[in-house]
Amino acid sequence: MTFKALLISVASLGLTTLAAQAQDYSFRFQSSDPAGNPNFEFQQQWTQTVNEMTGGRVAIELLPVGSIVDYKETQEAVAAGLIDGHITDTSYFAGKDPAYGLIANPVGAYGSPAEMIDFVENGGGAELMNELNNPRGLEFIGVSTPGLEAFVSKVPLDGVDDLKGIKVRNPEGLIANVFAAAGAAPVNLPASEVYTSLDKGVIDAADYSVFSVNQDVGMNEIAPHPVYPGFHSLPLIEVSMNKTTWDGLPEDLQANLKDSIKVFQKNQIETLMARDLEAVEAAKATGDITVHDWSAEERAKFRGIARGEWQKVAERSEMAQKVYDTLTAYLRDKGLME
């Protein structure tokens, strides 16, 4: 069924997300993650937190990816009232405005989840998100992230110069462009082919996932020079809902929802980071895996290279330029960029 047909069907049923009882609200959110995924489980815990923090006044049903619409169509679905909100990787909407891609994952910008969270909450990121979302009928209310991805490598990597000439699996777009600018040779492969491609020497390194996932699936066994903490990719996961619905909520419930996302954020980041640290110790204990931790200077050098690619994205829209200006001002203020 097409999005338009689905909209007509739902409208004809007269569905509403507002419960019949005054001050009681029932919402449906769609995730960009499948059921059973660890991130989806954290999101489900968030819905329980919302119910507890609002004293039962707000109930949220969380649907896995694709339940109502395709993951790239959730903005339209939220605006139209097919769903009340979404929890999603913001980069999926880069096709609507390149600013979404830049704010969602400015490759190389952050050295920890805390830096990205601080930018969003205190450095202007939340305001930028609502400048992007509000005209599309959505209200950005909070952020989380699975964390900073580690880097898989068969060869020792102790800094930017070591990237020169190595074949790196990257998704197309900004990430691949940044690695190419650093001297690497990006190779576009689906995640399902990374292990065998490393094993057969098709690639030397890979942008894959967080350290604990890499360790669990055996990546570090065949590519025994991981970089941790990672230096490249840290996705922004937004929690947004229909703006009209949001504006109609009492202020105390708006505050409860924002506070609940901070609980969700803390739970997801700290739990996954703890898993990563356990996996790092397990990897080191094998005696066959060498974990490389880049210095602040090398991370800043990579960030400087990435900045050139951010500038190219910034030239593609007015909002992308605004994201670039706000982000680089923040990084300079924090001493993360010259």
Image (cartoon, grey):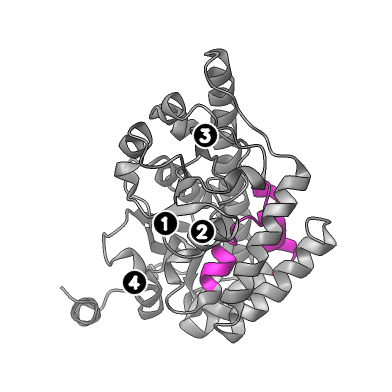
Residue at point 71%, 48% (across, down): 299
- What type is the residue that disc 1 sits on? Pro
Image-based side of 212 in relation to 10, left or right: right
Q: Spatial distance from mark 3 to mark 2, Cα to Cα?
A: 18 Å
Q: Which of pointers 4 and 3 lies earlier in the amino acid sequence?
A: 4
Task: Please identify the quarter of the rendering in which residue 269 is found.
Answer: top right
Residue annotated with mark 2: 175
Q: Residues within 10 Å of mark 3 (few under 14, many from 20)?
A: many
Residue annotated with mark 4: 73
Residue annotated with mark 3: 211
- What type is the residue that disc 4 sits on? Glu
Residue annotated with mark 1: 171
Pointer 1 with pointer 2, Cβ within 8 A? yes
The answer to if 223 sits in the magenta stretch is: no
Task: Examine the rendering and report whether any part of residue 35 can be seen.
Answer: yes
The residue mark sitting in front, 3 or 2, is: 2
- The location of residue 169, given as percent across then percent down, is 42, 48
Relative to residue 286, is residue 252 depicted above or below? below
Q: Give the position of the C terminus as an image quadrant.
A: bottom right
Q: Spatial distance from mark 2 to mark 4, Cα to Cα?
A: 23 Å
- What type is the residue that disc 2 sits on? Ile
Image-based side of 120 in relation to 83, left or right: right
- What type is the residue that disc 3 sits on? Phe
The residue mark sitting in front, 4 or 3, is: 3
* Front-lying residue, 253 or 92: 92
Q: Which of pointers 3 and 2 lies earlier in the amino acid sequence?
A: 2
